[in-house]
Image (spheres, grey):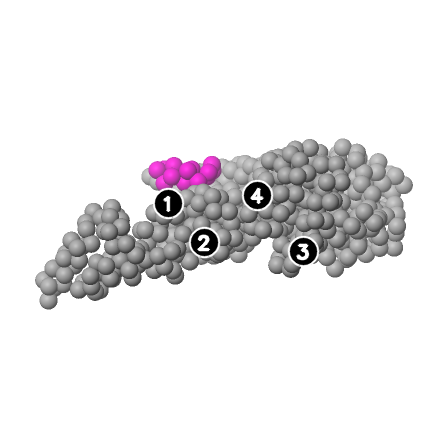
Amino acid sequence: MLKAILADDEEIVRTSIAKWLPWKELGIELAGTASDGEEALSMIMEIRPDIIITDIRMPKMDGLELIRRISAKLQDSEFIILSGFGEFSYAQTAMQYGVKHYLLKPARKEDLVRTLEEARKDIEDRRKARIASVPGAAEHYGLYLQRGMMVEVLSDPSSVDDVVRRCRRLSSFDPGEILTAIVSQVLSPARFAGLMMKTIAGMGIRMPMYPVSAAGRVFIVLDLPSLSGLEAIRKAVEEKGAVLVAVKRGTPSELITAFVEYASGQKEASIYAEDGSVETVKVSPSSSDADELGLIRRYRSVMNGTGDPSLMDDISSVFSSMPFPEARLLFLRMAIGEVGDSLLFKELADVASADELITLARGFLEHRVPRERDPFPIDTVLRYIKENYQNPDISLKWISENVVYMNSEYLSRLFLREVGQRFTDYLNSTRIEEARKLMEAFHRSTVSEIAEKVGYSNPGYFFHVFRRYTGMTPGEYMEKEASGKAKGN
């Protein structure tokens, strides 16, 4: 189920939208409401919602600033703007950040419902497109990923929570949502699973995982907003010649754990896809599965700071010995959850050979490709500038290599997109603003002394930059401040 946040300073708006929209029927959970922009920002950073509904004019931080600060960080999220009639120019500005949904206040219920449906479709289409961006993997990607998940959890049941966390974006479920699993006893699991998938799709019910089976029992996980839809599911099960033996409600981790506990007494489990494909997973992994799992775990350990000098040699050997499509899918399992999924898919889409894949794997390990491990790298850069602007040697390249561990060109583009200024311009404006504060407080200081205190070792360059940003020379500005203080006295 998708999560939404509502930010509006009018209590009546928050209350009415929260109460009279059919959130469950839309497949959306209203995870929180905020009365000002700062509260909304804090809530969004904690909850990471899929949909953000925000007013334009709010205290402490307006909706435009909220959108500007969030849009680059939550690229999968959709914004819906609520605004008064005279504020359309603000909405036009917001559209520069990719905002597509705009409603005039007071918004009608049917308009809000339609807009939420459109936002949900946009999110789902974007996730499907991300999967399809990996050449050759589109049809079998989801099945392959689930197979990898099952290999891990069947060989190590304690890994369930970690597997769910890493695969949450690409498996269409959130770790905290409550889902329903139906367990049916059948004679022909593959046939039954295929028929039920078509029936469930016709009902418009979301199925975030492929059906799995062991020893004649098929587990199907469904996103049922309420149990009222269960009776139709029960009838469908009986019509397909099966017996519904159990219904379980719980988080994805709890439902997967329940299946693992049942399958642990069996030799193998099966996974069924819409196209009729079936993947068999040994409850005790085969030697090849175990080797891949070992490589995956070693790679993740190195990504998280544990050294393994032989890892890249082993990766090179394994990738070179496999058909390229299989090697690419193996790397997908290695990096998923350790690298931002949008970045991972973008990089994989450009890889066309085993050698390029090996280079990419090494690049992630050595930070030559940005990992997106810090979800807010620009916040880190801004904080570093604020604390170190006095250092004359500060540069984007040094920060990229020593502070946020990102490719400097990528960081430069990201900084411009999120802050709206180039790094150099932002650093200069910060220094000049600090210089003005010093001049106002210590107007008898020399220009050279002020320049040195704000990070300029060359007073001539400081003179040039100061005049460009303020329209005055440093001397003229200091004379103005001194004159103002004299008149005040």
Give the amino acid at mark 4.
Answer: Leu
Q: What residue range appears in magenta? A: 88-101
Mark found first going from the N terminus, 2 or 3: 3
Pinpoint residue 413: horizontal percent, then vertical percent: 45, 42
The residue depicted at 20 percent of the width and 61 percent of the height is 446
The residue to which callout 3 is attached is 309
* Residue under numbered circle 4: 343
Q: Position of residue 310 (x, y in %)?
A: 70, 54
Going by the image, does 54 lie left or right of 354?
left
Q: Earlier in the sequence, mark 4 or mark 2?
A: 4
Left or right of 373? Residue 9 is: left
The kind of residue tagged 2 is Ile
* Quadrant position of residue 328: top right
Farthest residue toward the bottom?
A: 489
**Amino acid type, residue under disc 1 in the picture:** Gln
Q: CA distance from mark 1 to mark 2?
A: 17 Å
Mark 1 = which residue? Answer: 421
Residue linked to disc 2: 399
